[in-house]
Image (cartoon, rainbow, N blue to C red):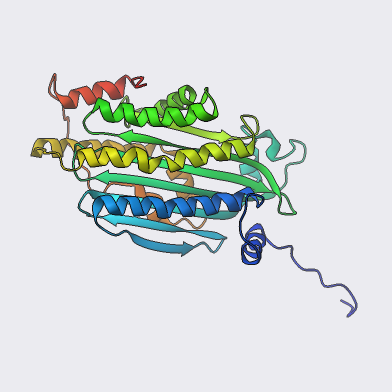
Amino acid sequence: MALDDPLMLDAPSLAERDQLVKRERAITDTSPMRLRMEKFVKEQQKEIVKALEEVDGTKFRVDEWQRKEGGGGITCVLQEGKVFEKAGVGVSIVYGTLPKAAIKQMRANHKNIADADNIPDSLEFFAAGLSLIAHPKNPMAPTIHLNYRYFETAKPDGTSGAWWFGGGSDLTPNYVFDEDAIQFHKSLKDICDAHNKDYYPRFKKWCDEYFYNKHRRETRGIGGIFFDDLDETVQDKEDIFAFIQDGLKSFVPTYVPIINRRKDMAFTEKEKEWQQIRRGRYVEFNLVHDRGTAFGLNTPGPRVEAILMSMPLTATWKYMYETEPGSREERLVEVLREPKEWV
């Protein structure tokens, strides 16, 4: 190469571009959505951890980690606390590259990810989300799970290509308290209705169908809402982001009153055993059917401990366990096999 030839440098990656933006200026409403979502979920993680620490009286362990492929996360876990056997609040920020096969697969739901006649060999992508799980000690207190996430592909200049939001929240009790179920579903319905009257019935049904243990012929819990692939074909990006924000912010005022009502209730050894059996069903769903777990474990450079954060600390499997006719345990199974309309 001649000395006066121009030096050809590789274009910066999406992760490098974003790092530069964050160093040079604050994240505002005019920043790229991926950076706004990252900022929001990190703020909410702090708020949620603070609220759960106040309930339990125990501090979370906080692990910050980085991915060599780009991004990283913060995993906050509380184990063997006073109220929670295990609770986890995790934020993950992932940068990576989609191969051509994955791009073709994603075109099934997102035609604008690439032109059918000109699918590139690869596309940079970004994903950010907050996942939460809380497994209380008391069998009268329900487990709760939520996840809110954002995904986008990037054009060569770093601007957003295809994008979509997903998420939801669901409640998994061992014993049905109608008061808790109604409060939980009403909170979600109110948030949905404020943004789109079609959201709650659509997302409630989606939740019942997604969190379904097919081999057991029952849902994992009493449901909530679940949605995926919300993009410009559904609503404007800003409108969906506002919905995501309201949904995540509703966790503390919705769940904390429920856990405070149930955490000190009396229970028997038999009721504790039932909780452990139901935890086993929870594990079965997560390892057999959950797409998020499979996606995480199959992503290059997975942080397995963070992906499996949702697993309970203890669970039990008993051969041919049967509930007693007319018992509270049997009522739960009936509800799980025929999901109810709580509001």
Quadrant where the image shows the N terminus = bottom right
Answer left or right for 213 relative to 91: left
Q: Relative to 331, does residue 271 appear above or below in the rendering?
A: below
| Camera-nearest residue between 189 and 72 | 189
Q: Where in the figure is residue 43, as x and y percent of width and height?
A: 47, 54
Q: Where in the figure is residue 49, as x and y percent of width and height?
A: 36, 53
**Hey, which residue is sitting farthest bottom in the picture?**
3
**Residue at position x 58%, y 45% from top?**
151
**Residue at position x 30%, y 42% from top?**
256
Quadrant where the image shows the C terminus = top left
| Camera-nearest residue between 165 and 246 | 246
Q: Relative to 69, does residue 219 appear above or below in the rendering?
A: above
Residue 294 seen from this side: yes
Q: Relative to 292, does residue 204 appear above or below in the rendering?
A: above
Q: Where in the figure is residue 240, as x and y percent of width and height?
A: 57, 36
Quadrant of residue 77 within the rendered picture: bottom left
Q: How many marks?
A: 0
**Residue at position x 26%, y 55% from top?**
79
Q: Where in the figure is residue 318, as x and y percent of width and height?
A: 17, 36
| Camera-nearest residue between 197 and 171 | 197
Quadrant of residue 173 within the rendered picture: top left
Q: Relative to 32, does residue 109 appear above or below in the rendering?
A: above
Residue 213 seen from this side: no
